[in-house]
Image (cartoon, rainbow, N blue to C red):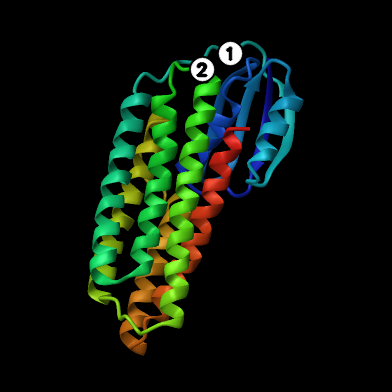
Amino acid sequence: MDKTVFLIAKMDCPSEENLIRMKLDGISGIKNLDFDISKRTLTVFHQGQLQQIEKSISELNLGGKKLATENAGQITFEENTNQKKLLWTVLAINFVFFLLEITTGLISKSMGLVADSLDMLADAFVYGISLFAVGGTLAKKKRIAKLAGYFQIVLAVIGFAEVLRRFLGAEKMPDFTTMIFISVLALIANSICLYLLQKSKSKEEAHMKASMIFTSNDVIINLGIISAALLVNWLNSNKPDLIIGAIVFVLVIQGAIRILKIGK
């Protein structure tokens, strides 16, 4: 058995780990995947098929680069029986916050919160695809991924169009207090998800490392919305909220494209 280590430069959160798992699913030579989000590395234990593994990782455009391959001998891997329960937990957290953010975003007129709600929905899609396709065929998983990806793109394009309309139209001031409060809650939710997923990998990783938290795109987005809310209040302008909303909608579209690449 061989062990190949990949640097995944753009792997910032557990949902991207799940994207990689789904993309590599079906390659029979893979025996185990070991992710380290804090170091942005993936260790693949496999028997042959290295070229196919490299190609699949490259197609996701996450900055995947092979670092080293060596013989790992014979290794027995333990099955993680809690994985399904864990995926349900993080899916539920992400979907609840999608509903919370899109509702409060529309009420408070904040495009930043609406955009972040779609980012939460995108993560929920990734965990959902992993759950609902378990035990199914690879073709079924690809169909689900395509539907989720296209749906996400449609929502993001509609949101981006609304951002442009507000840029060119009448001033609609978002409620900065709501923006800050909900973003702080979302920040806590993202940190909890990251903690649960990292904790599940090893008893030695039962604590949350600050370096892990702040490499997550989700957390950076939450901090961006909080900053935009402060600028909305300071400048008495909706432009900071629209700018952060536009940025997040672009990130959501990029995430949707990655989901679609699972279906290739």
Q: Amino acid at mark 1?
A: Ile
Q: Amino acid at mark 2?
A: Thr
For image coordinates 37% across by 68% down, the residue present is 111
Number of callouts in the render?
2
Circle 2 residues within 10 Å: few <14, some 14–19, many ≥20:
few
Q: Residue 251: tell me if it is visible.
A: yes
Quadrant including the C terminus: top right
Please determine whether, in this image, residue 53 is positioned above or below residue 206.
above
- Residue farthest along the bottom direction in this orientation: 235
Residue 75 tag number: 1
Question: Quarter of the image holding residue 131?
Answer: top left
Q: Residue 11: tell me if it is visible.
A: no
Q: Is label 1 or label 2 in front?
A: 2
Quadrant including the N terminus: top right
For image coordinates 58% across by 34% down, the residue present is 262
For image coordinates 35% across by 25% down, the residue present is 84
Marked residue nearer the N-terminal end (1 or 2): 1
Whether tag 1 and tag 2 are in contact, CB under 8 A, the answer is: no
Label 1 – label 2 distance at C-alpha:
27 Å
Q: Residue 36's x, y, as percent? A: 53, 38
Residue 137 tag number: 2
Residue 87 tag number: none
Q: Residue 159's x, y, as percent? A: 42, 62
